[in-house]
């Protein structure tokens, strides 16, 4: 299951309570206060890590709460601070405050993190309140509550190259040939239900990530097909590879199909059509593909690559 948006509730741990205690020893009947402070509550941290490709692991648990700090004890023993609660997400995750709407952080790279709910401070024990005028304070402070909020996380896949085109244009087939990705491939539209990523190795020390973006049809920016769900994954790519089927089985015009996708990208955000683009005519092994390729190249006015995928 591919999940690229999730909303969860997070709460930092409460601080531990301070302690009221007095030194009591055999030969010190009136020892002074020695109540320790409480420990701080744990914070909730969202961190980008390697190895995750979507947010599915967060869709089963809606509430996340860090541990509270340990209470203070006698003999000036300070309570233990609670550990932070770490929520791991893939790079490319945008973390927002759900109610206020503002972005807390865009976690673009592995290792980046954001504190989404700070733990409460531990309360002071009575030793803290000792003074020249108050030698035996009997007051202690309760720990402060941790912060809490609803956060919305949205994944925008980080890839160097985005494969775009109408359904059945051959995007998944191409991805499976140039990388070790294994997307579902079949002879019907909308086989790909979510973005697939593959690493392409160019030599021994160079590699780049390719994303297969599914479901782009006319009206995708308005929610038609699956494009509305996944157009945002194109935003972070540096290059678009636009696949155009040479001889569509539905008899549609390849040039018109190309322009349909370009219009959808522009409607979603005009910046996408300014991005570098490579046009590839696919399924060149079919009858009439050579003539279709020549017509597409003439209509676009620049070089168009060809493959048989």
Image (cartoon, rainbow, N blue to C red):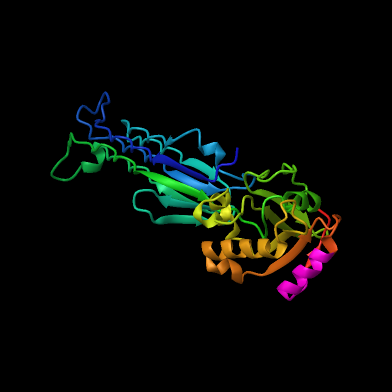
Quadrant where the N terminus sits is top right
Name the residue: 47% across, 46% down: 45
**Residue 60, percent from left and from top:** 50, 33
Give the number of marks. Answer: 0
Residue closest to the far front: 251
Q: Nearer the viewer, residue 262 or 183?
A: 262
Furthest residue to the top? 26
**Residue 231 lies in the magenta-colored region:** no
Residue 194 pos. (x, y %): 62, 45
Position of residue 103 in the picture relative to residue 282 (left or right): left
Please tell me which residue lies in front, 206 or 304: 304
Query: Does 244 appear above or below 14?
Result: below
Q: Does 176 appear above or below 255?
A: above
- Locate residue 233 relative to residue 76 in the image: left or right: right
Name above or below for residue 142 compared with residue 89: above
Most foreground residue, 108 or 121: 108
Q: Which residues are magenta?
A: 291-303
User: Which of these two is toward me, 46 or 73?
Assistant: 46
In x, y percent, where is residue 224?
54, 50
Please provide percent x and percent y for residue 88: 54, 43
């Amino acid at each position: 299951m591919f999940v690229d948006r999730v909303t969860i509730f997070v709460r930092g741990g409460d601080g531990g309570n301070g302690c009221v205690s007095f030194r009591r020893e055999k030969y010190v009947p009136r020892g002074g206060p020695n109540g320790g402070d409480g420990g701080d509550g744990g914070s909730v941290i969202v961190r980008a890590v390697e190895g995750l490709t979507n947010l599915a692991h967060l869709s089963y648990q809606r509430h996340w709460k860090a541990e509270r700090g340990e209470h203070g004890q006698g003999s000036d023993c300070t309570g233990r601070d609670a550990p932070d609660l770490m929520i791991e997400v893939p790079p490319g995750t945008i973390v927002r405050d759900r109610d206020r709407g503002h972005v807390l952080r865009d976690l673009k790279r592995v290792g980046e993190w954001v504190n989404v709910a700070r733990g409460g401070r531990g309360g002071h024990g009575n030793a803290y309140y000792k003074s020249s005028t108050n030698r035996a304070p009997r007051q202690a402070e309760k720990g402060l509550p941790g912060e809490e909020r609803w956060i919305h996380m949205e994944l925008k896949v980080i890839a160097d190259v985005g494969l775009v085109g109408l359904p059945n244009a051959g995007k998944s087939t191409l991805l499976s040939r140039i990388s070790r990705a294994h997307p579902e491939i079949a002879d019907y539209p909308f086989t790909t239900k979510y973005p697939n990523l593959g690493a392409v190795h160019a030599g021994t020390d160079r590699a780049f990530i390719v994303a297969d973006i599914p479901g782009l049809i006319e009206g995708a920016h308005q929610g038609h097909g699956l494009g509305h769900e996944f157009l945002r994954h194109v935003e972070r790519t540096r290059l678009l590879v636009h696949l155009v089927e040479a001889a569509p089985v539905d008899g549609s015009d390849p040039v018109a199909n190309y322009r349909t996708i370009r219009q959808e990208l522009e409607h979603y955000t005009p910046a996408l059509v300014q991005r570098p683009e490579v046009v590839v005519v696919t399924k060149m092994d079919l009858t009439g593909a050579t003539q279709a390729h020549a017509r597409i190249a003439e209509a676009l006015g620049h070089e168009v690559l060809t493959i048989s995928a």
